[in-house]
Amino acid sequence: MAVVFRFVDKSGAVKERFIGVVHVKETSSASLKSAIDNLFAKYGLSLKRLRGQGYDGASNMKGEFNGLRALVVGENNAAYYVHCFAHQLQLVVVAIAKKHFEVGDFFDMISTLLNVVGASCKRQDMIRENYRRKVQEGISRGEINTVELFSTIIEVLEYIQNEGVEDSKKRQAYGLLKYFHTFDCVFYMQLMLLILGLTENLSMALQRKDQDILNAMSLVESTKGELQKLRDNGWDSLMNKVSSFCEKHNAEMLVMEDVFVDPRKPRRKTNITNLHHYKVNCFYTILDLQLQEFNDRFTEVNTDLLICMASLSPLDSFCEFDKEKLVKLVKFYPDDFSYGETLCLEQHLDIYIDNVRRDERFKNLKSLGDLSCLMVKTQKHLAHPLVYRLLKMVLTLPVATASVERCFEGIMSNDEKKERKSDFENSEDERRTRFRSLKKKEINASTKFKHSLKKERRKSDVRVSSVSIEDVRDVEELQAVDEFRQALVMEELLPHKHDD
C-alpha cells in the first residue's frame, strides 16, 4: 500500500509528498487500517489531525460501513472521503464501451489492431517509416496538418494480409481492413475522438498536484456543459467530419434518408432511417449515457461541504462570498474551531471580505490555492488567521491519487527508466545497435562454452575415469547474455516456453 500526504506548507502552497510503501499481508480494511496506524505512529503523527482521505474506489477502501474509509471516519469525523476524481473520470469514459455494444465493438477492433500490428517490431518499424514519409510529403506540399495515421495503418494491414507468414494474422488483417472501411467504424471513431478530446483536458487538470477540490468540481461541471453542447448542436459538425473522412479514405458512406438495415438481422425490417438510428439510437444515446455517468459518479463528496466551500472562492472578486455558508463550513471541523473562535470568525468575516476586495492584488485570482499563497505573501494570513485556517482545511481535501503513480515512476532505477523509455526518446537505430551487440556477445559466449564441452568430450574418449569440465565462460559475456534476455523479455519477444 502506497501512502501520500497532502498538506499546505508555510508559504501557503499545496504540497503532496510520498511517505512510503507499506507492506500488508492481506488487503482487508482492518489490515490496511492497522498498517496506517503503524505508519502514523512511526512518524509521530495523529489520525485525529487528518482532514481528508482519498482512494481509487476499491470496495475495501471506500466501503461506507466496513471499508477503510469508514474505519478512519469512526476515529475522526472530519476526515472527509473523496473518491479519486481521475479514477472516477476513467470509469465514466469506460462505461460507454461497457454499456453501448457498438462502441464496445469499435474498441474491441482497436484492441485487435494493436495485437496484430504491435506484436511485431518489423510492423512497428513499417508504421513509423510510412508515417515519416507521409509527414515529409505533407511538409513539402504545405499540408502537414492533414497528415493522419489512418492511411499508414491501412498500408501495414494490407502488407500483413498479402505478405504475412501466419494465417491467423492474415485473417485478422483482412477482418480489420473490412471493418475500418465501414461507415460504423468512421462514425464511432469520429464521435469518440470528440468525447475523449473533451475529457482529456479534464483528466490532465485533475492530476495536477496543486488542484483543489472546488476547482476540480468546477472543471467537471464545465466538461458536462461542453458535452451537453455537443449533444444539442454537434450533430451537423460530426457528420461533416464523417463525410470528409469517408471521401478521403474511400470508406463506406450511407445515405441518411435510406432505410436502416441491421447488419445482425439484415432481413428484418427496422422501419427507421439511417438518420434516426445514428442520430437518436447512437449519437444521443451515447452522449446521454456519458452525461448520466458524470452525474452518478461525481456525487461522493459531501454536497453541503462543497456548497459551503464555494463561498471561499476568489473568482470574480469573491462574488460567491456568503457569510452564513462559511459559518456553517466551520461546523464541519469542530476539532479545529472552538465555540469562542466560531463566534469570533462570524464577526471577523465582514472585515476579511472588505479587506481583500479593496486590495487590487486579490482581483485576478483563479483558485483557492492562489488565494492561500497570496495571503501568506501579503501577510494577510496573520491579519485573518481564522479564515486562513479554514482555507487550509479545505485545501487539504484530496482530489486525485495521481501522485501515487508518479511516485512509483520515481522509484524506478535509472536503468529501468532507460529500458522503459518510449521509442521517441530512444531511436530505433540505438535499439538495433544494442540488440546486435548483445546478440554478438551471446553468440561468442555460447560458442566458447560449446567448444569447451567438445574439447572435454574428446579427452573423455581416451580417459576411463570421470573428469571435470573446465568452464571457460567469461563473466562479462554471461552478463551480456543475461542483458540480452532481459531486453527480449521487455520487448515481449521471448516466449515463456523458450525462456530456458
Image (spheres, rainbow, N blue to C red):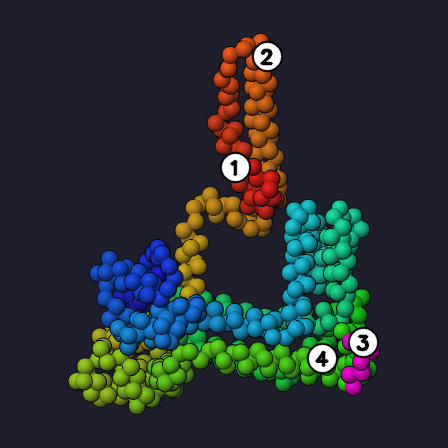
For residue 39, say whether it is visible.
Answer: yes
Q: Quadrant of residue 345?
A: bottom left
The N terminus lies in quadrant: bottom left
Crowd band around label 1 with a 10 angstrom C-alpha radius: few (<14), some (14–19), many (20+) = some
- Magenta includes 266? yes
Q: What residue type is labelled 4?
A: Tyr
Q: Which amino acid does label 3 sit on?
A: Pro
For label 1, the residue is: 483
**Could you tell me if the residues under marks 1 and 2 are in contact, i.e. CB atoms within 8 Å?**
no
Magenta residues, as a range? Answer: 265-271
Q: Which residue is drawn at 65% across and 82% down?
A: 284
Which residue appears farthest toward the bottom when viewing the image?
A: 324
SS state under label 1: helix
Crowd band around label 4 with a 10 angstrom C-alpha radius: few (<14), some (14–19), many (20+) = some
Give the foreground label among 4 and 3.
3
Crowd band around label 2 with a 10 angstrom C-alpha radius: few (<14), some (14–19), many (20+) = few
Q: In which quarter of the image is residue 373?
A: bottom left
Q: What residue type is labelled 2?
A: Asp
For label 2, the residue is: 461
Q: Is residue 68 left or right of residue 140?
A: left
Q: Which of marks 4 and 1 is nearer the N terminus?
A: 4
Q: Which residue is drawn at 80% across and 80% down?
A: 268
For label 3, the residue is: 266
Cα gap from disc 1 to disc 2, whole angstroms: 36 Å
Q: Which of marks 2 and 4 is nearer the N terminus?
A: 4
Give the foreground label among 1 and 2.
2
Q: Measured from the top left, where is residue 370 in percent x and y?
A: 36, 73
Give the foreground label among 1 and 3.
3
